[in-house]
Amino acid sequence: MTIKMIASDMDGTFLSGEDSYDQEHFARVLSQLKEKGVRFVAASGRQVANLKELFEPMAAYGLLDQIDFVGSNGSVVTTPGQELYAVYLTPEQIRKVIDWNALNPQSADNVIVLAGVNGTYISNHVSQEFKEMLSMFYPNVVQVEKLLKIDDKILGVSFVWPHEEVQEHVQQLEEVFGEEVHVTGSGFGSVDVLPKGVDKAAALEVLQDYYNVMDNEVMVFGDNTNDLEMLAKYDNSYLMPNAMPLMHDAHKRLALKTNVQDGVLATIESELKLDNQVEMD
């Protein structure tokens, strides 16, 4: 197996808990990937700023230059040196999404999150507790009086519902908007409305073009519906054993262990025959 790029979802996949992973273990794997000329891509519904903060500890090992980022479920693609790609919702699309939410009887208690270039925006009525929770995943959370008056480029609009209702609302939004936007579930009860054609697989194609990597040289890991496109696109794709049942119906090849057992790293070590005992300085 010749692999030149490995992309992993974060929550429920690479991360063993909220914002946590075995940094020494990852550094051990990443250093060997560097020797083999393999890029690592953090591909997430989180924004790029949050992803960069997560992996900043790799700078101490001299390995930060080995990581690329796909943020906001594919709306932004960056390398260590530059932003390769970014796409935004139009003001008209944002208004249509928010108007739909206001008229939806089931939306009375949900929360709307607008992910922008300069900040993450929520309504003034959102509780401080939720704001603090959101700050774990999004940078610069700002409460505003009117979401439609925000002066920023918006990468995506997210709604937060009870986890068990996510797929129902994804289907509702798809029926309303058709192919005008891309709608996906993104874990933790989040439903993300993204620009048309935006998903993690399309974002990885941008990086493949940049690094001259073929589809059969890409390995991917995921656990949720926002990972479906990349799991389906690449032959070397692995679903986490801890994924929800509907994901197991859609994808059969599993990582060796769950996310809390460092399943992504264990599978990489096994498939690429890495040394899991190598010492890090």
Image (cartoon, rainbow, N blue to C red):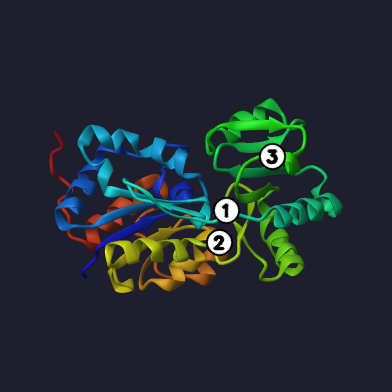
For the N terminus, which image quadrant? bottom left
Q: Distance between the Cα atoms at labels 1 and 2?
A: 7 Å
Q: Given contact means CB atoms under 8 Å apart, are the residues at marks 3 and 2 in contact?
A: no
Please give left or right for residue 81 compared with residue 90 in the image.
left
Question: Which element carries disc 1, helix, strand or loop?
Answer: loop
Q: Nearer the viewer, mark 3 or mark 2?
A: 3
Of 235 and 74, nearer the camera is 74
User: Viewer-nearest of labels 1 and 3?
Assistant: 3
Q: Mark 3: which secondary structure?
A: loop
Whether residue 32 sits left or right of residue 77 in the image: it is left
Q: Amino acid at mark 1?
A: Ser
Q: Which mark is residue 186?
A: 1
Disc with the residue nearer the chain's start (1 vs 2): 1
- In the rendered image, residue 174, in percent from the top left (x then y), is placed at 70, 67
Q: Position of residue 74 (x, y in %)?
A: 49, 57
Residue 69 at least partly seen: yes
Q: CA distance from mark 1 to mark 3?
A: 24 Å
The amino acid pointed to by label 3 is Ile
Q: Quadrant of residue 260?
A: top left
Residue occupying image coordinates x 13% and y 44%: 278
Left or right: where does residue 122 sit relative to residue 276? right
Dot 3 or dot 2, earlier in sequence = 3
* Residue that protrudes farthest toward the front in the picture: 151
Q: Is residue 200 above or below residue 53?
A: below
Residue 173: x and y in percent read 73, 62
Q: Which residue is mark 3?
A: 150
Residue occupied by mark 2 = 225
The amino acid at mark 2 is: Thr
Which is nearer the eye, 29 or 155? 155
> Please, is residue 157 above or below residue 219 in the view?
above
Discs 1, 2 touching: Cβ within 8 Å: yes
